[in-house]
Image (cartoon, helix red, strand yellow):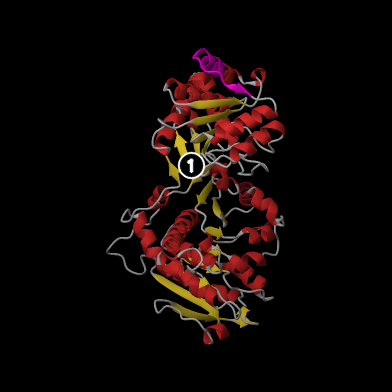
Amino acid sequence: MRLVTAAEMRAIDHHAIGTVGIPGLVLMENAGLKVLFTLEKYLEGVKGKRFTVICGKGNNGGDGLVVARHLFNNQVPLNVFMVFPRQELSEEARANLAILQASGFQPVFMSDTDDLERLRVALEFSDCTIDALFGTGFSGEIEGYAREVVAIANEATSRRVAIDVPSGLCATTGSVSQVTFQAHATITLGAPKVGLFLFPGRDWAGEVWVADIGLPPVSFEAVPAGQTLLTQDLAASLLPPRPEQGHKGTFGQVLILAGSGDYQGAGVLATYGALRSGAGLVTLGMPSTVLANLSCAVLPDTIVRSFPEEEGGFALDDDAVRGFAGVYRALVAGPGWGKGRHRQASLLAILGGWAGGLVLDADALAAFPDRSRVACAGSDLVLTPHLGEMARLTGQPVGSIQADPLGAARKFVAQNPCVLVLKSSTTVVVGPNGHAFLCSRPNSGLARGGAGDLLSGLIGGLIAQGMSGLHAALLGVWLHSEAGAIARAELGPEAMTISEVASLLPRAFRRLRGEERADSPLRA
């Protein structure tokens, strides 16, 4: 499903109004009606419930006024609070205010502390609070009187529903004001907004419902799509073919160069991902002395191969890379490499001599000698940094990357053509053309060592089957998150292990094939 920034949504609206000729008041009426229909589903009916609608001065406030009018027309008890004076309202909001008043309902225009107390009392007796204060045009900080209004609204024990985005949340970056409306549910209009799926915004949006307000497809087509939400349907469409007459060569070979004296298990976990991906042959390459003294079990399905080592880690050179170049379709390098001084030379040998799909993870990402250049001779380069590794790759503080992961990922890919998998609570995947995919399925159970090793092996195994780096990254990220979700549901986030997540990858595949039910992050 397409995700839009605030600017993209504004351009889509302008096209529908200015080029197609749909009046803004018609779109606002559609928006209010669809919000009402969605409230019917979310609240399991509106009859017998009492509402408080808090309206701002822009078109978001206008949407709230339409909702209020239809609630009033259906004899549903409600209060409407206008936070700004009439003269500051947008043209469409002012028109809908006039219609509401002509229909016989008079909202409260707030201006002083008595009105704040009046709002507090109204909320005490409401079943649902509707936030129509600030919409997608907002960014920065809510200040002054409006800040007090939002703080009081957050104290309400009623169900809190935001129209389009919670007030205080940036629709593009997911950043939030110090005081932001805490929604139980957000009914987003036209198309879901990026900021609803990026943290911290995701924590404030609650359950996200999408309301179609009648924007024509031609208006969406007029504005290039920049982001897509990674969903089960999208992931399922990427599943590689698996002909029953195929053999192990059909499904490709992957070599995993992982592990060191200090991190022996990293390579083993990566092989779990590759073996569960469907790859035909999985080889684990490790430094010779580490392999000879391995303390954790390698699955018998795995081929093992020793490589030159120094100080307990890899010491690869051009000859070593030429020795396996052309044998494997995909290579995974970096998990558990450690910080040995030969790590950078090993990476440069791989970048210069490897010609297949290449997944670089963990310690390999810290070995780049020049932040301004990340390139290899292979056809598919996939980098899988977490936030800290991304900070080291770019020289930027972790905080700045965390504040705008989408922008940071796009900027990096523009300078370093690759597929970037920026791992976090919402994982961002950016392809070489700059299009971004968001996997917004936070799971604290995956916040433990080994999760990235498993993912890198899974992506490498998918590339070995002939998938492009981008498609393998997207499918791998989804399968990894789905197996994690199953583990969380059955074992709990505290006790689940990454080895158990690996064992649940078969069920993740079954869900993609429609053999098990999976939950959706969106409601319509």
**Relative to 104, 299 lies left or right:** left
Viewer-proximal residue, 430 or 206?
206
Q: Position of residue 471 (x, y in %)?
A: 46, 54
Q: Which residue is mark 1?
A: 208
Does the stretch in magenta take in 104? yes
In which quarter of the view is residue 167 placed?
A: top right
**Relative to 249, 404 lies left or right:** right
Does the stretch in magenta take in 447? no
Element assignment for label 1? strand
Residue 434 visible from this viewpoint: no
- Quadrant of the image for the C terminus? top left
In which quarter of the view is residue 74 placed?
A: top left
Q: Is residue 231 above or below residue 138?
A: below
**Relative to 374, 211 lies left or right:** left
Viewer-proximal residue, 17 or 494?
494
Q: Amino acid at mark 1?
A: Val
Residue 95 visible from this viewpoint: yes
- Quadrant of the image for the N terminus? top left
Q: Position of residue 258 (x, y in %)?
A: 55, 73
Q: Tell me which segment is drawn in magenta.
A: 95-109
Q: Is residue 357 above or below residue 416?
A: below
Instruction: Please report the residue visible at 68 percent of the width from the left and 58 percent of the height from the top.
Output: 391
Q: Is residue 186 above or below residue 370?
A: above
